Image (cartoon, rainbow, N blue to C red):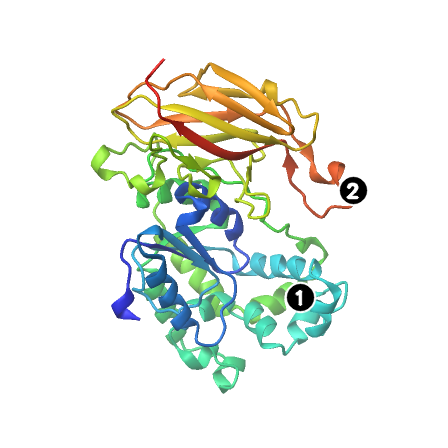
Amino acid sequence: MSDLNRKDVVFFRHLPKTAGTSLTTTLANIYGDAQTYRFRDVGEEFGELFSGVLQARGDMLSLISGHIPLQVVPEGACGTEFTILRDPIARVFSLRRFLEQQPAEHRARMGLGDTITIADMLASRIPGVYAQIRDGMARFFSSHSSFCDPSAPEFWHPPQDGRVLEDCAEVLGHMTLGTVEDMSTVLRNLQRRLRVPYEIETGMENFTAERSEDATLAEIHALTEVNTIDLALFHTVMKRLPKATRGTVSLLGAEIDHRTLFAPQSGQLYSPAHIPGRQGFHLHEQRGKLCWIGDTGRGRIHLAPSDTAQALTISLYGVVPHYPLSEMVFTVDGSRWRRVFTQVDSNGHYRLATIPPHANVIELAIVQPYAMPAAAITPGSPDRRRLGAALLGIRSEAQPPD
């Protein structure tokens, strides 16, 4: 795999049940969905698939993510590598809640019922469940193959002599780290590490609610006994984590990763997947080819410095036929911006007043009047989002300034 290493690609090695899906959404907004690749499954010959993606995507790939253990893809495959950790006991409770939300047939294959107790999980001998609740973090970052191989005795009886702990601590020492318990520090440190010239924001919609209040002391004690390596590892790493510095993160032009900015070219039409520099949006949806404004009600697009004036037309979709698209507000660096509005069916088109040349990064914000629960639009929908307007595309007009 070494001959295909891409030092310009960021690698988010996503430890399961660490609110990583929310962060993945944020990263896809930063780089643009077309510049990111999320691996969904890690199966046989995954190393070849991983290398193939790095090779095939060429210069269009900026970030990869997925539940990819160190045993499957070792260190050094990409450039900046980072991960998010979580208190080991809280991670098990989150896993329980996640499993209870899975389809009944999926739980049945794991020998689990509708209600899952800690005792049920501890009794499971399904390798995927067993490994997740018994030092799952150490297994994820371990280079000892026997610790991660169900055919090896060490898988079922992990060594307790500190070898695995030291091995994982060394691996994590090479990564950019953060914890679910302190996401504000994670975001500020990532902003610096990834050289993003604007504040990174993320929702916690995938932070699976903990439900530890119905666990007995005996169950918590049992979890502690089977997670001794993870607990030692977590608290060892916590002591080494850098604290976020106070104040605004300031980056000069040469320090900025310009892949995190939108630089529209005259005469081009861009779909949301090809618009980097976004914040406050959900993931791009292939079916509708759109990107919903998120829970803050304010989608932000960060424009790269430009020595020419820019005439942009933004197209939005309203969640219901009567959605007040005419009430959408646009701002540029906080100042309300003039626009000419036209509507065709459920689509609104907004021709913005020309944005003059600018030497610095500027923020173009799209503010929606309100959002409504998806279940109020489609009764019974499992979608927990609140939806209002969605970005369909941006056209950069080839014309002189106003």
Of residues 169 and 187, the one nearer the viewer is 187
Quadrant including the N terminus: bottom left
Between disc 2 and disc 1, the foreground one is 2
Residue kind at label 2, given as amino acid type: Pro
Location of residue 114 (image quadrant): bottom right
361 relative to 108, above or below? above
Query: How many residues crowd around disc 1 within 10 Å: few (fewer than 14), some, or many (20 or more)?
Result: some
Quadrant including the C terminus: top left
Residue kind at label 1, given as amino acid type: Glu
330 relative to 144, above or below? above
Location of residue 172 (image quadrant): bottom left
Quick one: SS at disc 1? helix
Task: Tell me if label 2 and label 1 are in contact, CB under 8 Å.
Answer: no
Give coordinates of residue 183: x percent, y percent. Answer: 47, 44
Residue at 62 percent of width and 69 percent of height: 222
Give coordinates of residue 296: x percent, y percent. Answer: 56, 31
Of residues 152 and 86, the one nearer the viewer is 152
Residue at 42 percent of width and 45 percent of height: 186
Where is mark 2, residue-wise?
A: 379
Residue at 54 percent of width and 81 percent of height: 156
Q: Is residue 385 left or right of residue 391?
A: right
Q: Is residue 111 left or right of residue 224?
A: right
97 relative to 71, above or below? above
Where is mark 1, residue-wise?
A: 219
Of residues 349 and 63, the one nearer the viewer is 349
Residue at 28 percent of width and 53 percent of height: 8
Give coordinates of residue 365: x percent, y percent. Answer: 47, 26
Count of numbered badges drawn on the protein: 2
Quick one: SS at disc 2? loop
Disc 2 from disc 1: Cα separation: 38 Å
